[in-house]
């Protein structure tokens, strides 16, 4: 639809869904057609951006919604496969154009559709899951193995979280690994164990992984096996809040602690409660550090800003009685670009802290 101002001047064209809080998502601010060619141009630009930055490897995010000029569309690349996730009603209807553009960009590649069920319910469309093209392997399976630096990571398309992996943490996995050699590792909220696999391959360990979901624990075990580091790791099926408390009570110490929880809130009104949750785990994470140990701590709640998160960690350090140096602020990987004009495109914030 066209969006006009009160004088009738064209402001842009976008996808309209009156059912949601954001009724119109702009695809262009120019007087140009929203057609298959526009989608192709946007995806071509997104690929060029990643290629120029050296980010277009075996697993990367090709398209990050508003930040790539295609609101409601996420495309992740795993080897020869493009995984398409439509997050709005409008974009779900343009799925055919998206598939066509990907077919032109990656001739011979496969395309898998993995819409998010929650977004589909809010927006009012039927989420699609499955191959839009032939599968890369003849058995039609949805298992892909990708190389992430020295690490092998297994991806089961259409299962688990995101489109398969937390690609947004890819650069942080490698960064934390640099601090891990010779250090005992605690990987809380581990999902498929990517932080641990990288840390163990870099000479860290032994590692303790804490994860409450059975599916994610199984994924972590498979990745640890695939990298030949399973004997130096222990996957604990536990609630991280409880397990952190118990580790602290037992006076355990680690050289590297990772706290990468799911979003504690998706609503602005619940930020206070979320802050209490972040503070609690960070107090415990800091107390579990040996002298000189490092804590990589994250929030992926949209409404928790970097400033807010730093304040929470400062309070936590005060309560924990730990003096900590900020080694570096942390954020989402560069293939998840941030649009200055749309601050919501930045959602992952974190700190790499060192106990002094
Ligand atoms: N660190 C991972 C991503 C973590 S996503 C990576 O880099 O790939 C957050 C994970 O926390 C999910 O796997 C989810 O199942 C798990 N989780 C959620 N609540 C939890 C809890 N209370 N205790 C332990 N794990 C939890």
Image (cartoon, helix red, strand yellow):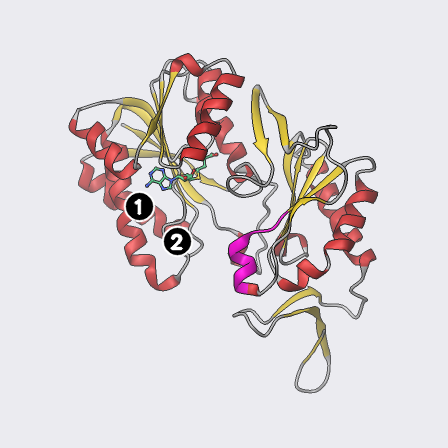
**Residue 196, above or below 128:** above
Residue at the spot of label 1: 278
Instruction: Name the image quarter holding the N terminus.
Output: bottom right
Residue of label 2: 304
Left or right: residue 54 versus residue 313 is right
Q: Label 1, label 2: how many angstroms apart (C-alpha)?
A: 10 Å
Queried whether the magenta region covers residue 196, the answer comes back as: no
The circle on residue 63 is none
Determine the residue positioned at 48% across, 50% down. 347
Outermost residue toward the left in this view? 249
Q: Earlier in the sequence, mark 1 or mark 2?
A: 1
Dot 1: what SS? helix
Q: Position of residue 263 (x, y in %)?
A: 40, 49
Element carrying mark 2: loop
- Residue 101 versus residue 198: which sits nearer the camera? 101
- Residue segment shown in magenta: 114-122
Q: Is the magenta stretch mostly helix, strand or loop?
A: helix
Residue 118: image location, x then y, percent = 51, 56
């Amino acid at each position: 639809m066209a969006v006009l101002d009160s004088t009738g001047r064209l402001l842009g064209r976008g996808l309209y869904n009156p059912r949601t809080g954001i009724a119109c998502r702009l695809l262009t601010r120019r007087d140009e057609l929203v057609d298959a060619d526009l989608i192709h141009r946007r995806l071509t630009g997104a690929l060029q951006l990643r290629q120029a930055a050296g980010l277009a490897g075996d697993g990367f995010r090709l398209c990050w919604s508003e930040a790539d000029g295609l609101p409601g569309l996420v495309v992740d690349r795993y080897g020869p496969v493009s995984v398409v996730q439509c997050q709005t009603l409008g974009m779900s209807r343009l799925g055919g154009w998206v598939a066509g553009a990907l077919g032109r960009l990656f001739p011979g590649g496969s395309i898998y559709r993995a819409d998010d069920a929650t977004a589909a319910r809010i927006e009012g469309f039927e989420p699609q899951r499955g191959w839009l093209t032939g599968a890369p392997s003849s058995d039609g399976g949805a298992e892909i193995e990708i190389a992430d630096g020295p690490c092998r990571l297994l991806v089961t398309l259409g299962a688990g979280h995101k489109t398969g992996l937390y690609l947004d943490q890819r650069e942080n996995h490698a960064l934390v690994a640099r601090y891990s050699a010779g250090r005992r590792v605690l990987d809380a909220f581990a999902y498929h164990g990517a932080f641990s696999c990288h840390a163990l391959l870099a000479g860290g360990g032994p590692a303790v992984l804490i994860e409450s979901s059975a599916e994610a624990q199984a994924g972590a075990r498979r990745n640890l096996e695939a990298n030949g580091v399973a004997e130096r790791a222990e996957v604990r099926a536990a609630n991280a809040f409880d397990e952190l408390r118990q580790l602290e009570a037992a006076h355990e110490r680690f050289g590297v602690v990772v706290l990468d929880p799911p979003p504690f809130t998706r609503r602005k009104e619940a930020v206070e409660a979320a802050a209490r949750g972040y503070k609690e785990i960070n107090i415990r994470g800091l107390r579990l550090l040996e002298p000189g140990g490092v804590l990589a701590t994250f929030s992926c709640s949209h409404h928790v800003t970097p400033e807010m998160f730093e304040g929470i960690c400062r309070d936590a350090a005060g309560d924990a009685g730990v003096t900590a140096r900020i080694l570096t602020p942390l954020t989402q990987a560069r293939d998840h670009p941030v649009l200055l004009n749309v601050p919501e495109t930045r959602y992952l914030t974190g700190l790499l802290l060192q106990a002094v």
